[in-house]
Image: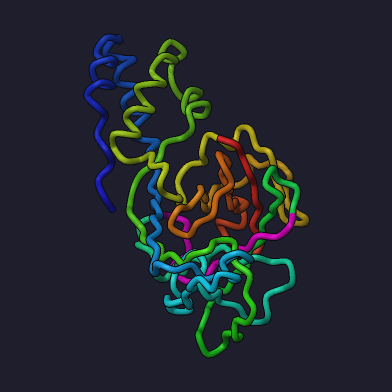
Amino acid sequence: MTAPPQLSSRLREDLSRLSPEVSAVVARTLQENLRPCLLVESKRVSQAPLHRGALGRMLGLRTDEPRLPLLDSKLGGTPYTLGPMEQGRWFLGQLNFAQLPPSVPGLPRRGLLAFDGVRGHSAFGLSFTSRWYPRPTEEEAAPARNVSRLGRFEAALHFRESWSLPCWEDLQSLLPDEVWWLSDDVDEWQRESGMCDARCHRLGGHRSFGQDSLGVFEPPTGLSKDFREYEQLFRLNFDNAADFSWGSNQVYLLVHRDDLAAQRFDRLAFAVAND
């Protein structure tokens, strides 16, 4: 795992204005609450899209076939599935945990998680669902025919070790009352150190600040309706490489803490927030 980021020069300078005791508490709290995560970057694998709209088809514009291996982590392309994709479901992407760096506590060390879009009631007309395969093999996979995809392009996923902090509301509850004005310093430190990167999706880590104002929260049947009982498993931003977007919204795949402890990933919650 990469070393935790050191406090920024601006943050250290502002801490020096506090009493030594308070400064030490703040510095220790920030460092002790860093949590490992993986930043997820996408890279388009072909120049032509996998599908085109009516005009593109009428003009005979070129399309490309999926290229990435069936079990790869990716957005778009050929989904891993054990049966035909249901009508009205759009393949979004999948994560093969066996391909991930083993540096984030709680994440499985094997298994494949696929996630799809379905018609829903969010601001952009989509809801989400997931498929969990504990031991995926190509021999068991069903042929992928007539697959509908959310993104027009296929994109490979690459994983980079990083760190995350609690959102400011959570962090502030751990800090002395008189240091509320440090929020800008903390935000700047996260940007400068690479902890915050709007181009990346994110696996693991603390929950993002947008979850304090969820527009949609869909818990699994029979599980708690309190989003605070769930850990953030995967955060999906817009993606230029795969060519899908939901504006300023972010989509979250959440796992209940009890399920995370049991390494059970077959019933995830989904949430949408406008950040």
Decide which of 180, 24 is in the foreground and name it.
180
Q: Position of residue 208 (x, y in %)?
A: 51, 39
Work out which residue is located at the far right of the displayed protein and give it: 222
The residue at 48%/65% (across/down) is 153
Query: Where, by quadrant of the figure, is residue 212 drawn?
Result: top right
Q: What x and y, as percent, mark residue 182?
A: 38, 18
Q: In the image, 112: left or right of 119?
A: left
* 122, above or below 54, in the image: above
Relative horizontal placement of residue 12, taking residue 84 as reference (left or right): left
8 vs 66, nearest the viewer: 66
Whether 219 is drawn above or below 197: the answer is below
> Of all residues shown, which one is farthest toward the bottom?
139
Q: Residue at coordinates 36% horizontally, 44% vertically from top-left?
A: 163
Can residue 245 be seen in the rendering of this structure? yes
Q: Quadrant of residue 249?
A: top right
Viewer-nearest residue: 70 or 57: 57
Taking the magenta stretch, the answer to whether it contains residue 11 is no
Q: Is residue 118 above or below residue 81?
A: above
Quadrant location, the C terminus: top right
In the displayed structure, would residue 164 be above or below residue 77?
A: above
Instruction: Measuring from the top left, give residue 172's x and y in whole percent.
Output: 48, 23
Q: Is residue 111 visible?
A: no
**Residue 10 placed where, x, y %?**
25, 20
Total tally of numbered discs in the picture: 0
Type of colouring: rainbow
At 26% across and 50% down in the image, what residue appears?
A: 2
Task: Name the residue: 52% across, 79% down.
Answer: 136
Task: Judge left or right: residue 218 versus residue 32.
Answer: right
Instruction: Reply yes or no: does residue 117 show up in magenta.
Output: yes
Residue 41 or residue 217, whichever sits in front: 41
Q: Is residue 237 left or right of residue 89?
A: left
Q: Which residues are magenta?
A: 104-119
